[in-house]
Amino acid sequence: MLKRIISVLIVLASSSAFGWGAIGHQIVAYTGANSTTDGKLFWKSNLEPLRTLTTVPDRIWKAPATKAEERSTHWFEVDVYFKPVEFSQIISFPSSYSAAVGKYTEGKVLTNGTAPWRIRQLYQLAFQAFKAGEVKSALQYVGVMSHYIGDLSQPLHVTVNYDGQLTGNKGLHAYFETSVLKNETAIRADVQKRTLKLLKNGNFLNQFNGSLMDTILLSVERSVSQVEQVLKNDKMYGRTAKGASVQLELAKDRLADGAATFSIILNQLWKETGLVARTNPLKVDDPQWIRPDYVE
C-alpha cells in the first residue's frame, strides 16, 4: 500500500497532464479511421462515435477519483532514457512493463509516463471484445486508445521539456497543441491529405512490420525528433501570427503521423480478429474508467 501511495505522489509531482486539445485528438481519431483499408466500411460508418470517444481520457477519466492513476498514461518522456544521438535505439526499450520497471524502477517509469503500455492494454481489450462479439465495447476501447496514440504524436508528450520550461519556452505546450488549432474541419481536410500521403510512403510503411510495441516506439522516435523544431520555431517567431502559422504546419504533420499510425493499427486489429465488414453505425456511450493494467 505504501509503495502505491509513493508511486501516486511521484506522478502527481511530475509533468502536468497536457495533451492535444479536443480538436487535435478528434482529428487523429476521425482521420485515422477514415483512412483505413481493412474493415473500412465499419470504421467509416463509426467516424463520429470514434471522434467523441477519443476525448474521454481527458474529458472524463481525469476526474478527481481517477486522475492520480490516469495522469501518467498520457505521456512517455523518452529523452530521459535516451540521449538525442541514441534516439535510433528507442525501439530497444523494454517491451514489457515488468522489464522496464525491473531496469529503471517503477517510480521512474511512472514519472516518465506509461502511454505505450496503455495503448497495448486497450488494443488487447478491443481484440478480446471483438473476438467475443462485443462490438460496442470493442469500439469503446478503440476510441479511447486513439487518444493515447494521438498523445504520442505530439512532440511535447515525449520529452521531459514538455512545456518548454527548461529552455525559456514556458507555456509552449498548450500553445502548440491547442491555441494554433482553431478550425477542426479545415485542419482535418489538410491532415487527411497528409495522412494518405504517408500511407503511400514506403519508408513510413516499413516501420510497421514488427510488433505493436515496435510500432508504438517507432512513433515515439518520429515524434521526439521534432521537439527541437517546435522549440526553434517558438524562439524564432514567438507566439505571433507568423509563429502560429509555422507551428500549425508542424502540428498538421504530427497529427497526420498520429492518424496514419492509428489507421494502420486499426487495419491490423481488423485482420487479427477476422471480422467481416459491417456498415451500421453504432450508438456508443462513454466508457467507465479502465484502470491501467500492464500485466503481460
Image (tube, rainbow, N blue to C red):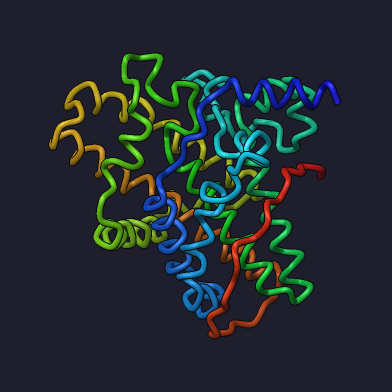
Residues 25 and 228: in front is 25
x 34%, y 26%: residue: 171
290 over 228 or under it: above or below:
below
Q: Is residue 207 visible?
A: no
176 vs 63, left or right, is left
x 54%, y 78%: residue: 42
| x, y percent for residue 98 | 80, 32
| x, y percent for residue 258 | 45, 50
| x, y percent for residue 251 | 32, 43
Residue farthest to the right, as pictured: 1
58 over 264 or under it: above or below:
above
x 51%, y 69%: residue: 49
Figure disc tally: 0
x 61%, y 31%: residue: 113
Residues 202 and 115: in front is 115
Q: Quadrant of residue 146?
A: bottom right
93 vs 182, left or right, is right
| x, y percent for residue 295 | 81, 43
State the quadrant of the C terminus. top right
Residues 274 and 125: in front is 125
143 vs 182, left or right, is right
Q: Quadrant of residue 202?
A: bottom left
Q: Is residue 161 visible?
A: yes
State the quadrant of the N terminus. top right
